[in-house]
Each structure stands twice: as C-alpha cells, then as structure tokens.
Amino acid sequence: MKNIFKKIVIAILTLEARLVLVRYKPKIVAVTGSVGKTSTKDALYSVLAGDFRVRKSEKSFNSELGVSLTVLGLPNGWSNPLIWLGNIFRGFFLIFTTNYRLQTTNYPDWLVLEIGTGVPRDIEGLAKWLIPEAVVVTRLSEVPVHVEFFKSPKEIIKEKGFLVQALEDHGTLFLNSDDRDVMGMREMKRQCRLVTFGIEERADFQASNLEIVYEKNSHGAVPSGITFKVNHNGNSVPISLRGALGRQHVYPALAALAFGESLGLNIVGMAESVMVYTTPPGRMRIIAGVKHTTIIDDTYNSSPVAVTEALRTLGEVKTSARKIAVFGDMLELGKYSAKAHEKAGKETVGVADILITVGIRARDIAIGALDNGMDEKNIFQFDGVAEAGKFVEGILVEGDIVLVKGSQGMRLELIVEEIMAEPERAGELLVRQGHEWKNR
C-alpha cells in the first residue's frame, strides 16, 4: 500500500511540477555527475543570488521526486501522508492561483537543480520534461556510486547523458576538462555552446596555484582552508575558501564563475560571493577535534574517486603529527566492491600513519593496505560506528589529523560527533542531523 501511495504522490507532484514550469517559465541550470553535485549546486546558487530570484535543490533533492519538490518549492514529507497531501494541495494552488503578484514577484527567475541517478531510467524520465538552459557536469568515476544497479559504469554515463541531450539547442554545456568521460559528453549535444573548467587540462576557466592555508594557534599550525587563482581570458582572480580542504572545492567554484560569466555577471563580484558561501557539511569540512586535533569530515558519502581525492588532500597536509584515516564501507558498488576497497587500502599506504576501517566491505581496505606494506599494528577494524568512534577517541593525541569518510548508509558522522571538540554544534556542522535521520 505504501508503494502504491508513493507512486501516486510522485506522479501527481511530477505533473504539477511540469505545469508550474509551463506557467512560470523559470530558467534552469541542472547539475549532474558522480561527485561534487551538491557543492557545485550551492556555488552556482551563491553567484546567482545577488542578481536574480533563485531557488536551489534542498540538501540532495536530486531524484524525480526531489526535483519536483524543488520546482514546487515544497518540503519532503518523509513518511507523513498528511504532509504529502498538503504538498499536493499547495502544488495545485501554485498552478491555478490567479494572484498576479504571486506569479510575477515570488516565483524564481532561476532554478538550480541537482540531478542524480540511482537506478536506470531515473534521468531519462526527467529529461522528457526538464529542458535546462544550462547543464553542468562535475566529474564521473571509473567505479561510480550506484553502479551495482547498472550493467556497467558506461551505462551510468549514458544515463547522465540524457540530461545533456535535454539541454536547449542554444543552451550552454559546462564540462570538467580534467575528466575524459565528461568531455566525451560534448558529442551528445554538438549544437550547444561549450564552456570548460578544470585544473590540470587546458580550460576556459582554469585554476592554478592551489595551496592549503594554515592557521597558527597555541598548539601549532593547523589547516584552515585553501587558496587558488581562477584564470580566464588573460585575467586572474584569487579565491580563498575557509573551513574546507581539497580540489573537490575548486571545481564548484570554477563552474560557478564560468556559469555566471555566461550571464554577463562580474567575475570579481562572483569571486567574492563564492568566498563567503559555506561548503556543505560532510564534504572535506575542517572541524576542531578533541585533544587539540583536527578532523577532516568527509562523511556525506563515498566512492572510489572520492576516496582517492580525499587521500590526495590528506597527503598534501603539512604536519609533524600523525595522520589517521577512518574509512567506512563504500556501498552500492556491486561486483566492483572488493577491488575498489582494496585499491583504497593501497592508496592509503604512505599517506596515513593509522588506518581504521568500519564495516564488512571496508575489511578489504585493510587487506589492500596490509598487502601493500602498511604495518599490521597500525590497522584496526570494526563492524560498527559506536565501537569505532570510542576507539578513535581513545587513541587520539594532540596534533593528530583525522580523515573520516564513508558511504551515507554507514553513518560515519557519528564518529565525527564522538571526537569533535564541540559536539553541541553537531546539528550545525554535521550531515544527517534532521529528525528523519536521528530517529533511525
């Protein structure tokens, strides 16, 4: 019965969203990729918000239902049927209201939509009624999240390609030049304008001089953020991002500036907007830990390419103290799971001094590290977050840098909460702090 009710609700809300788009005619910029979608969506919103009425997908509303809720400006009803019925009523009101003021002044000029895929035909269905003026593709992955539900990684690329094909013929396609598979999507829509952004390969908007910034305190120097330059048409604009680490945050800034420039926005003003926006929780956020330690909180989700990037960043942090990697299972990798976890373990060697794994699949991370030279005495394995969190807290010493990363279902933010210096700020700083997660 619940499944039938859910299907009916999704069908009605999708129809309402389509009718709202017809009535209010907002412009749409859609973001897809395997990693970096939410950060890119938020960066795009930050550069648009100063000049337009704009609405973005809340949290990670990236499914057909989430996109419909964003278009309608409605909340997630979770398991409450009364909220869903209220949403349906409000959707009809938005479509059929004769309030001219509501129509002309309240509905956004731009919608910034995050588009993801969990199973085949997710994006294909959306692309039949969603026609964006701009599409941003962040980064793909050799072994993407949700791959177990597809025949191969190429099938996921094909699925995400439906969004590119849905782009207006005279729209703009923004592609990550550092990703060969992303650049290959150009062939899916030759008639649109192409703008590229990247770090390593030549791009229309290219980052350089990426550095980690350190902040001195009474216990030494700790990482506090990153700086880099954005180069475009012979001009260079400095960007400083506080509170987060990693190249993962460079790409969203590049995409946002590229998109804003296509609308004629001032690049200096956009750079200022990007620098004041707060990176989403659980995405390489820097959090003060107990015993004067530093946590790199990357607990939103996990995939092989994201683990590689997180370890790259951990390796770049300059410190005389220990580096500790806490890794949970990477879920939904199907037949690629064992090799992907073993590879993560191999990549940990030489970067982290101590490896702690959480979950059954993550045991293969430990195997990969052990097989590639990490001392067994520095590898610790746990089945659950509760015991792992207490163990991590117990071994920490002043100055330690702790990277915590795992798939959403592993709930490794609970480990961060265990070892953070201000656990009373968990609701502000960590992912999955809503009642729907707390009650699970």
Image (cartoon, rainbow, N blue to C red):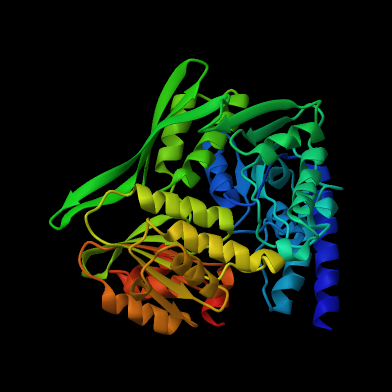
- 319 is higher (above) or lower (below) than 5: above
Seen from the viewer's position, the closer of residues 156 and 192 is: 156
Residue 191 falls left or right of residue 207: right
User: On screen, 264 above or below 145?
Assistant: above
Q: Quadrant of residue 68?
A: bottom right
Asked if residue 379 lies left or right of residue 165, the reply is left
| Residue 98: % across, % down | 79, 49
Q: Residue furthest top?
A: 234
Q: Position of residue 103 (x, y in %)?
A: 73, 44
Report if residue 210 is visible in the image.
yes
7 or 244, which is in the foreground? 244
Q: Along the horizontal axis of the image, is 435 left or right of 153?
A: left
Q: Is residue 96 visible?
A: no
Q: Where is residue 51? Give x, y as percent.
A: 55, 33
Q: Is residue 38 above or below residue 250?
A: below
The residue shown at (53%, 78%) is 359
